[in-house]
DNA sequence: GCCAACGTTGGC
DNA sequence: GCCAACGTTGGC
């Protein structure tokens, strides 16, 4: 099983939305590196740290699970969507989506500030300066420690 | 709201 | 294939 971190702005889609929905399509990814993780590496049952960006507090707000495997992102073919991509074709789609299933909502987020303060997380991607990648692989040890941090509050 | 860091585009 | 210009991300 692999571990991931996926970023979202809670004003757009939050962990509370996922808790309500149960399962949600993770679409609108328009970055090739993130696309490759979704399309090529994510597998059913992989665990996800659900990260809130551009908010207060910034941090990991809960845990989710990959459900199924990647499929063509429908928003790329929707000319009314701001994510419409006229260079993508149905026979060879450029962008992919995947379903994400709710597992847990942290009572309080494990904040980015906390992670940056703790040397244990020095080699975690999300604590690196300038790291904008919205879908990132996460080491098992980091995943476990973050879940424990939340459980021990 | 600012802006540094990063990714993409397109002219050459 | 280089790289300047531009657009976006996302912490602060």
Image (cartoon, coloured by chain):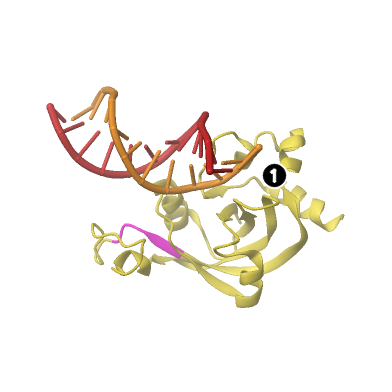
Chain colours: A yellow, B red, C orange
Q: Residue at x 62, y 47 (%)?
A: A138
Tell which residue pokes out farthest to the bottom in this image: A21
Q: Residue at x 35, y 67 (%)?
A: A81
Residue under label 1? A112
Residue A70 on the magenta segment: no
Location of the C terminus of chain A (image quadrant): bottom right
Location of the N terminus of chain A (image quadrant): bottom right
Question: Is A145 situated above or below A82?
Answer: above
Q: Is residue A30 left or right of residue A22?
A: left
Q: Residue at x 67, y 49 (%)?
A: A58
Q: Is residue A119 left or right of residue A9?
A: right
Question: Is B10 situated above or below A5?
Answer: above
Element marked by disc 1:
helix
Q: Residue A21 falls in which quadrant of the image?
A: bottom right
Question: Is A41 situated above or below B7?
Answer: below
Give how far across and how far down residue A11 sits, in percent: 58, 62
Give how far across and how far down residue A95 sits, in percent: 36, 58
Magenta residues, start to end = A93-97
Q: Residue A62 falls in which quadrant of the image?
A: bottom right
Judge by depth and name the residue closer to the eye, A6 or A55: A55
Q: Residue at x 51, y 57 (%)?
A: A42
């Amino acid at each position: 099983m692999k571990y991931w971190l996926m970023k979202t702005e809670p004003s757009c889609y939050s962990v509370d939305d996922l808790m309500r929905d149960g399962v949600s399509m993770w679409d609108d990814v328009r970055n090739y590196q993130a696309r490759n993780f979704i399309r090529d590496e994510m597998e059913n049952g992989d665990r996800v740290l659900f990260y809130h960006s551009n908010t207060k507090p910034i941090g990991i707000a809960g845990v989710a699970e990959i459900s199924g495997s990647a499929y063509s992102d429908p928003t790329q073919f929707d000319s009314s969507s701001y994510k419409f991509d006229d260079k993508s074709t149905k026979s060879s789609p450029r962008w992919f989506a995947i379903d994400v299933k709710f597992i847990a909502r942290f009572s309080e987020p494990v904040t980015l500030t906390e992670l940056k303060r703790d040397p244990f997380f020095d080699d975690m991607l999300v604590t690196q300066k300038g790291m904008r990648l919205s879908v990132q692989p996460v080491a098992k040890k980091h995943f476990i420690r973050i879940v424990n941090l939340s459980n021990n509050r």
